[in-house]
Image (tube, helix red, strand yellow):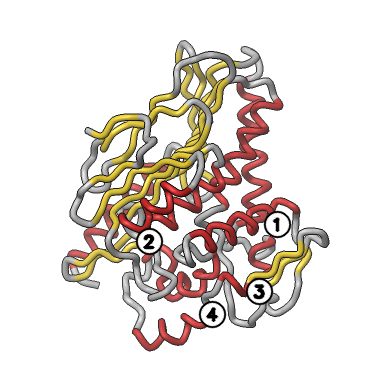
Amino acid sequence: MDLKKKITYALIVLSVLSILAVSLFKDRQKDSVTISRAMMGTIVQVTIMEGPEDNSDRAAETAFTEIQRLEGLLSAYKTDSDVARISKNAGESVRVSPDTIEVLKTAVLVAELSGGAFDPTVGVLGKAWGYSGEKGVVPLREEIGKLLPLVDYREIEVEEAASKARLKRKGMYLNLGGVAKGYIVNKAVEALKREGVERGIIHAGGDMVVFQKGEKEPFSIGIQHPREKRLLGKVRVYNGAVATSGDYERFFEINGKRYHHILNPKTGLPAEGTRSATIIAKDPTLADALSTAVFVMGPEKGMELIERLPDVEGVIVDSSGSVTKSSGFRGEIY
């Protein structure tokens, strides 16, 4: 590994360590309580703004418990998860939880809507790349070529009534990382509501869900600039999700070329043409998957998909830094 790559990785490692150093943090302000914890490979922040005054700690703990439960089902990195068992037993049906069935249904739906730009079977390619680029090497074209036939969302079979799922061909590998986080955060919000929380936010990496009751002003949510340490703009959301996929989240560089973790299922290479894609939608699971799909599709086709879908808006930054927003976008671009 050359010096430039070593420096890039050193900076990434330092950033990760600084985040993990605050893996359990509580911030009490006048009108809200924020509790943070390291989960799902990121920092999850639960902010409670309105609810029983003596219940914020218990409510947050209920949300974290739900996140932990679902991560145990949906993570490809946990050997006993539903997702790992489906991959391990590729070719055979595996009994899984209703939660896993729901996530798989949304994953397949978005794969169909995007023409395969989003594909949860891309996990077999992720293994070759080291998932997030931690190997610091680019796989040989021959290796990628051998794996591409194993990437096909149409080979996922979901038996909802029997609560079973399978990958039809051996060697296929399932990874729901591009959709599960949205589902998990949504379920954590439901847990907060059951505890009496009426207004709050859950933020987990590139996924955020806001919720509230009554006639209040919408939340103003910042959109990260993909190259600079500032906001690109902000969007107003009353109830719903904001999900962003970007080439700045996990990457490495070789000879000035950036290799990021969002792979194009058709080429096996990092998707080109987009720096970031932000989706605003009522359904957090859909928003999560769509942000990846739109990123891979590119600015033109991605925006066409956004405009076709009800209750979905978006902002796309292309490879040159130009910004496009959907016709119903409510907010500002700076």
Query: Is residue 23 in sight in this rendering?
Result: no
Rendered image: mark on residue 297: 2
The nearer-to-camera label among 3 and 2 is: 2
Q: CA distance from mark 1 to mark 2?
A: 26 Å
- Is 89 on the left or on the right of 9, as rendered? right
- Per the model, the C-alpha gap separating discs 3 and 4 is 10 Å
Q: Nearer the viewer, residue 124 or 137?
A: 124
The reply to whether callout 3 and callout 4 are in contact (CB within 8 Å) is no
Label of residue 101 in the image:
1
Q: Secondary structure at mark 1?
A: helix
Q: Residue under label 3, please give it.
A: 167
Closer-to-camera residue (16/234): 234
* Disc 3 residue crowd, few under 14, some 14–19, many 20+, Cα 10 Å: many
What mark, if any, has residue 150 been given in the picture?
4
**How far across and how far down the image is residue 303, in percent?**
36, 51
- The residue drawn where x is 53% and y is 62% is 111
Marks 2,4: beta carbons within 8 A: no
Tag 4: amino acid = Leu
